[in-house]
Image (tube, rainbow, N blue to C red):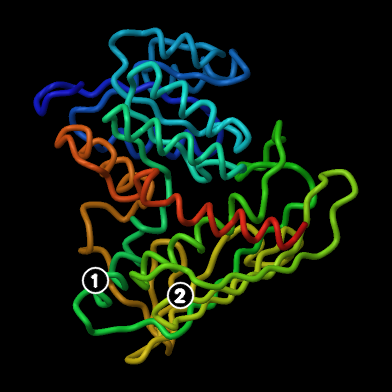
């Protein structure tokens, strides 16, 4: 366990596009040091480790978990490994932050939440949208009673007809519109409304012959507050937005806001300054800051595995509908 003055020593698993984003964010956080890097390809992992001054390199998570100096682990590994690796970290007595999604099978997520509770360790899931300055700004307006969501309209679009990551490199695993990309919006919608999701519907397009997943999907949600959410997802979208990811339109009783990553605009497309919302404009860094602060303060983090489990219950319902 880390006391407030001690350097928190971290193992990071997954040296791909997202792992590097975490390494860049952690560089800006005082009192935190990445001491071990885990990834599939030893040479590529060494290359990344050298760049960030990380001494210990391995292809096995178990090697990092065996290091007594490691206090915490950040998992940026393939979706299919998230739940079992999170359990392994908790069993090894390490605090853990797992990238979104927590799981792709609901019972696995429930097992993580139950072990995290029993362990007393910090266990958090990378629901970055809770931390992006743009969404934080909207959240503050809602909490102050100045804005109430009537509808969220969200487009999650990529051009990904082959299996590549955000850096354009080949992936060893298949990404998923429902369990990964929809998870961001399903969680954010309930979080921003401060109200649980009471209705959820989904339809999907044809299954890709070699990837075995739907490349297009449409989801409708309703919160107990009465607010609705319309989410469109595609891996088939060409054009300027093809690599951009997700655009959020908040339609409310007192205004309209458009969030594009960390930037925010009003309904007339005039930019709103969100640079003073938090200590950084980088959502991943802010997410990591919350993880380490929760470890130091011995408290539950925002986006703890317990808080996000409801999102995965909704995804499970949607998967059953689609089946």
Between the C-alphas of marks 1 and 2, the distance is 19 Å
Q: Residue drawn 49% across and 77% down?
A: 152
Q: Locate the N terminus and report the quarter of the image it occupies.
A: top left
Select label 1 or label 2 by which is in front.
Answer: 2
Circle 1 residues within 10 Å: few <14, some 14–19, many ≥20: some
Q: Is residue 166 left or right of residue 56?
A: right
Circle 2 residues within 10 Å: few <14, some 14–19, many ≥20: many
Q: Quadrant of residue 254?
A: bottom left
- Whether residue 148 is situated above or below residue 171 in the rendered picture: below
Q: Is the C-beta separation of discs 1 and 2 under 8 Å? A: no
Q: Position of residue 101 (x, y in %)?
A: 53, 45
Which residue is the site of mark 2? Answer: 223
- Whether residue 105 is situated above or below residue 189 in the rendered picture: above
Q: Is residue 120 left or right of residue 65?
A: left
Q: Of helix, strand and loop, which one carries label 1?
A: helix
Q: Residue drawn 26% across and 42% down?
A: 289
Asked whether 24 or 308 is in front, the reply is 308
Q: Residue furthest left?
A: 5
Q: Quadrant of residue 304?
A: top left
Which residue is the site of mark 1? Answer: 140
């Amino acid at each position: 366990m880390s006391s407030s003055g001690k350097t928190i020593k971290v193992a990071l698993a997954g040296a791909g596009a997202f792992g590097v984003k975490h390494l860049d964010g952690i560089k800006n956080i005082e009192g935190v040091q990445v001491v071990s890097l885990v990834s599939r390809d030893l040479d590529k992992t060494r290359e990344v480790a050298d760049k960030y001054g990380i001494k210990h390199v391995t292809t096995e998570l178990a090697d990092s978990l065996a290091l007594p100096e490691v206090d915490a682990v950040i998992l940026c590994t393939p979706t299919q490994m998230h739940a079992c690796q999170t359990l392994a970290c908790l069993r090894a007595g390490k605090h853990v932050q797992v990238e979104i999604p927590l799981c792709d099978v609901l019972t696995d997520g429930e097992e993580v939440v139950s072990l995290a509770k029993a362990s007393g360790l910090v266990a958090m899931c990378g629901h970055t949208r809770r931390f992006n300055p743009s969404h934080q700004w909207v959240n503050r307006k809602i909490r102050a009673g100045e804005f109430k969501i009537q509808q969220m309209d969200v487009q999650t679009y990529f051009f990904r007809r082959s299996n590549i990551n955000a850096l354009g490199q080949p992936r060893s695993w298949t990404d998923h519109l429902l369990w990964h990309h929809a998870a961001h919006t399903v969680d954010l919608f309930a979080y921003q409304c401060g109200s649980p999701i009471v209705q959820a519907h989904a339809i999907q397009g044809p299954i890709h012959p070699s990837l075995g997943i739907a490349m297009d999907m449409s989801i409708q949600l309703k919160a107990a507050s009465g607010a609705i959410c319309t989410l469109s997802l595609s891996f088939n979208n060409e054009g300027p937005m093809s690599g951009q990811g997700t655009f959020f339109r908040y339609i409310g009783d007192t205004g309209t806001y458009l969030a594009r990553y960390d930037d925010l605009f009003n309904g007339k497309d005039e930019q709103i300054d969100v640079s003073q919302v938090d200590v950084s404009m980088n959502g991943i860094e802010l997410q990591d800051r919350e993880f380490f602060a929760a470890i130091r303060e011995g408290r539950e983090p925002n986006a703890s595995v317990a808080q996000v489990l409801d999102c995965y219950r909704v995804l499970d319902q949607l998967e059953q509908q689609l089946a």
